[in-house]
Image (spheres, rainbow, N blue to C red):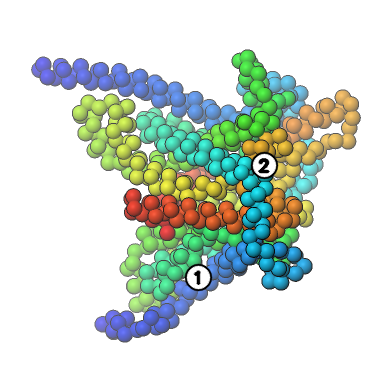
Amino acid sequence: MGLRRIGNESSTWKKIWRNRSLYVLLVPSLVILFCFTYLPMYGIVIAFKDFAPALGINDSPWAGFKYFEQFFNAYTFKSTILNTLLLSLYSMVVTFPLPIILALLCNQMHAKRFKKFFQVSTYLPHFISTVVMCGMILLFLSPSSGIIPKLASMVGIQMPNLMALPGAFRHVYVWTDVWQHCGWDSIMYIAALSAVDPTLYEAATVDGASQWQKMLKIDIPMLLPTATVLLILRAGSIMSVGFEKVYLLQNNLNLVTSEIISTYVYKMGMISSEYSLSAAIGVFNNVINFVLMMVVNFAANKLSNTSLI
Amino acid sequence: MAAAVAANKNKVQHTTTDKIFNFFLYLITGILTVVALYPMYFILIASVSSPSAVAGGEVILLPVGVTLQAYQKLMDYTSIWVGYRNTILYTLAGTAVILAVNLPAAYALSRKDLVGRRLFNLLYVFPMYFGGGLIPTYMVVRDFGLVDNPLVMILPFSVITYYIIVARTFFTNSLPDGIWEAAQIDGCGNMRFFFSFVLPLSKAIIAVIALWAAVGIWNQYMTALIYLRNEDYQPLQIILRAILINNQNMASMTTGAAAAEAQKLAELIKYAVIVVSSLPVMCIYPFVQKYFNQGVMIGAMKG
């Protein structure tokens, strides 16, 4: 009785005061977030300035859209954007459906031991670091001693040096990604399938449905909602393909197809010290990303009531 | 009777299609298992084979001319062990910081009576969609004196929204509302409640996030690439990059035929280095697989 009366009378400030220690719990993360995430957002202004390290951010003269124009007019502009989009779209088209298929296969397996073994072996590559993964790719594809050209020559195929072929870069990038992450990405779908009511399968069996039919008519429809949400999430990050793997697999011979926005920003900023130009490209990429996210979020809201924010 | 026979016939027919289906199912999954495992198996057998056998392509299914030469050479390569030590330290400290920073925030955000909950949520989620970008972030980190400072591997990027969302979902769904009310009546404050009730009841989610964080830091290389110059602070992944990607040669003093041999050995060392650097994570994984899967499912519930 007494407790309830206090609750009714207390103003917002009193509520805040009563839960003050909850705010204390938030403080460490808020401080770090403010310092290293929100403060850098102010630094974006250098994209619109002729930034000189000696003058600092505030005293550097304004440059307007000079660096944006410089980027748009650079001969690398078109190819960099195109490479980013192509790599990311190709990657999405391939790496999105495969985990679903893997989960469907896994769900049909009745040999428990082998199923477990299959799952563990397909998850395992996920734990290899990007650096080691790229090292493995280079070792395996090496024209002089790599195992893949060796195996190919055993069946009579002469393999070119894939790392030196600009046309092969995207395939190497995407299909090694499939090897590394497909199993891991299927976990979500396997979880969704394990939630399917077993009586559905029993009913289908009574009606004389084969395993193949059960997969088509029960499993696939059951996965659709999960798949939609994940697809929407992926679509929002089209312009942000991972920097690490691309940067590690890049070399002068495949640069024509492997230079993407994030690697370009890194080289401009950290290696050539073109701070303002690099920041301008970063802003450009960020804005496109943000707009894409908003559009996707809006579409998702309309389509399935799943909002990301 | 006739119906029963028909039903029986039907059943037989379906078992045949199911048999074909199963044949292809196990064939495909069998092939996929081999495809998934073989590259890792090959690295392992190549690392213990003789350098010339590997270079000559003789090693395919079993090690040839077993030798631990590569591993012995590796023992002398001190920067790997410095990197190893650094990575272990970063992983331990970084995981601790991530837990200490994200778990309390997640708990506070899970409480419905937190005034301003929506605003705070937005503050945490917004950076997922927008950020300062590389150069502005670099300048801020530099102004804090964290460039070439090992703390950069632990502190600045320790707030991870995804972990907060997952932990928040866990706290919301698995802590019964009744305990907080009961504890409150007994005069227990928020702070004490968090430390003596919430944390002990959330061992599962703590394990999941600790594992994610540890694997993430172990494999992390971009932060070090951008912010660390001093060789004494480099984590393992940067050393690996030097050896595996940039072909930093460990035996370049020799000439002639010896040089060719040294070249082969240098290739072999790459295999050994992959084994040495990846084995810890791989060995731990099967034991903690249960938690990982659990975590993915908790994460999946957020939609």
Element type at marker 1?
Answer: helix
Earlier residue among tags 2 and 1: 1
Residue shown at 58% from the left, 49% from the top: B215
Tag nearer the camera, 2 or 1: 2
Q: How many marks?
A: 2
Q: Position of residue A24 (x, y in %)?
A: 51, 74
**Separation of residues labelled 2 and 1 (CA atoms):** 37 Å
Is there one chain holding both mark 2 and mark 1?
A: yes
The 10 Å Cα crowd at callout 2, few under 14, some 14 to 19, many 20 or more, is some
Q: Is residue B19 above or below residue A304?
A: above
The picture places residue A250, in percent across and down from the top left corner, at: 68, 39
Looking at the rendered structure, which numbered label has been put on residue A26?
A: 1
The mark found on residue B300 in the picture is none
Tell me where residue A172 sits by quadrant: top right
The disc numbered 2 marks a residue on which chain? A
Please say if the residues under marks 2 and 1 sit with CB atoms less than 8 Å apart. no
Depth check, front residue: B127 or A235: A235
x, y percentage for residue A25?
50, 71
Residue placed under numbered mark 2 in the picture: A248
Q: Nearer the viewer, residue B214 or A178?
A: A178
* Amino acid at circle 1: Leu
Q: What element carries label 2?
A: helix
Question: Residue placed at 42% from the left, 73% from the top?
Answer: B116
* A157 horizontally vs A206: left or right: right
Q: Quadrant of the N terminus of chain B?
A: top left
